[in-house]
């Protein structure tokens, strides 16, 4: 089986067990069905996909994509896909003066980790995506690196890197 990957995000250590092949594919297809039309609109009818790395990526493009993707999901589907993405993720939290590892597979555990910190949830989802789809993000060339510079500017209290 695949190795568990760990990362500290904010003040919490997260561990991600990669999905099985078919679970990975099912999640990817579910997201792509929603995201492809939105991404197509975002790149503005780019005719030559090989030039996608030259596309200007700024905060408004990223925010527009995220807003359209999430607003396109009904509430129950939004919750279901997030829980499905995070079901093999563990968080180390302080509980009764001890550090314990909890699996993000219940509403109670989601509340323990993400209550009043939904931005953290999206950062953890990004980590899960990087663990499960490294080959997919590699296909996008330097867009992933450029996105790292833009996305923090959309988050409270964080600054984007300057080129």
Image (cartoon, helix red, strand yellow):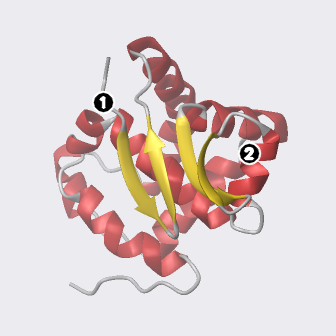
Find disc 1 in the rendering and name its residue. 3
N-term mark: 1 or 2: 1
**Image spot of residue 88 (x, y percent):** 54, 31
The image shows residue 139, relative to residue 119, as above or below, that is: above
Quadrant in the rendering for residue 116 = bottom right
**Image spot of residue 51 (x, y percent):** 18, 53
Q: Residue at x 80, y 41 (%)?
A: 107
Report the quarter where the N terminus lies.
top left
The image shows residue 110, relative to residue 22, as above or below, that is: below
The image shows residue 98, relative to residue 40, as above or below, that is: below
Report the quarter where the C terminus lies.
bottom left
11 or 72, which lies in front?
Answer: 11
37 or 134, which lies in front?
Answer: 134
Find disc 2 in the rendering and name its residue. 109
Residue 48 is at least partly visible in this image: no
**Image spot of residue 84 (x, y percent):** 63, 30
Q: Residue at x 64, y 53 (%)?
A: 68
Q: Residue at x 44, y 39 (%)?
A: 16
* Callout count: 2
Quadrant in the rendering for residue 17 = top left
């Amino acid at each position: 089986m695949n190795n568990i990957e760990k990362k500290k995000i904010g003040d919490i250590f997260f561990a991600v067990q990669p999905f099985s092949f078919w679970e990975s594919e099912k999640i990817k297809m579910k997201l792509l069905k929603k995201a492809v039309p939105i991404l197509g609109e975002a790149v503005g009818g780019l005719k030559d996909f090989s030039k996608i790395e030259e596309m200007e990526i700024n905060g408004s493009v990223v925010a527009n994509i995220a807003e359209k993707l999430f607003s396109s999901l009904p509430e129950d589907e939004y919750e279901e896909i997030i829980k499905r993405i995070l079901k093999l993720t563990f968080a180390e939290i302080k509980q009764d003066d001890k550090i314990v590892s909890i699996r993000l597979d219940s509403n109670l555990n989601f509340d323990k980790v993400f209550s009043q910190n939904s931005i953290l949830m999206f950062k953890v989802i990004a980590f899960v995506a990087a663990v499960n789809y490294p080959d997919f993000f590699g296909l996008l060339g330097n867009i992933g690196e450029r996105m790292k510079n833009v996305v923090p500017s959309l988050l409270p209290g964080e600054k984007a890197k300057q080129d």
